Amino acid sequence: LPFTNKVVPFDEFKEFKTKLPCGLLPVLELDDNGQYLDQSNAILRYVGKIGGLYPEDPLLALQVDEVIYTVLEADKLVEFSLFGPKHMMFNDAPFEADEKVENRKRMMDPAVTQKNVAFYLSCLEKKLEGSKSGWFVGDSITIADLRTYQLLQWLTLGILDGVSTDCLDTYPHLKALKAKVEGLPKIAAFREKYGTRYGTF
């Protein structure tokens, strides 16, 4: 699918966000009417449908959504570690730097009994164990694989203080999926062009 990826510089965002439904990124701008649509997972599903990466079969679509919502559970924990209780409106104090690191160690520790990131990674790992193709659903890539890749990349980039870049070593199927996605020519070209734009958090 042809598209233009636009990265909005910080100094332009204040004015740009007044045009957006909720004042947040990312958004999808439609060529035909200039309408902006937000919510990244809704955009992902829309693009997946028109690009052939979201199954028409209801049961297969359910399996794709099952993976995506598992990833979202892990995402919420990573987000909490980024922004702390203040962002989540639990209290007025953000995490201190040492609290961030300690919380991230706990969220990645398989020995922790609560449903942490390690728990959800284990769930995803088990789903891939039974796959002959190496993809979550069927014999080809779907948006389930792409959404999972986003989480795996985020965890292994080395930008989350307290999360080791080798954190996927105990999840060999997920590690293989990450490499499989990165080996796709269009993904590789996109990553080469846009790269990583973040410092550490």
Image: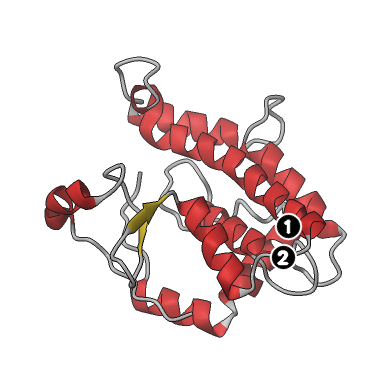
Q: Count residues near mark 2 (Cα–Cα under 10 Å), then give few for <14, some for 14-19, many for 20+.
A: some
Q: Count residues near mark 1 (Cα–Cα under 10 Å), then give few for <14, some for 14-19, many for 20+.
A: some
Q: Which residue occupies the foreground of this view, 22 or 104?
A: 22
Q: Percent from the top left, x then y, of residue 35? A: 31, 60
Mark 2 secondary-structure assignment? loop
Q: Percent from the top left, x then y, of residue 131? A: 84, 64
Residue 172: which quarter of the image?
A: bottom right
Q: Amino acid at mark 1?
A: Ala
Q: Amino acid at mark 2?
A: Pro
> Spatial distance from mark 2 to mark 1, Cα to Cα?
5 Å
For label 1, the residue is: 61
Mark 2 or 1 closer to N-term?
Answer: 2
Label 2 close to label 1 by CB (< 8 Å) = yes
Q: Which residue occupies the foreground of this view, 23 or 114?
A: 23
Say if residue 154 shows up in the picture. Answer: no
Q: Percent from the top left, x then y, of residue 33? A: 30, 67
- Which residue appears at 74% of the width and 67% of the height? 135
Say if residue 31 shows up in the picture. Answer: yes
- Which residue appears at 59% of the width and 79% of the height? 183
For label 2, the residue is: 55
Horizontally, is 33 left or right of 182 in the view?
left
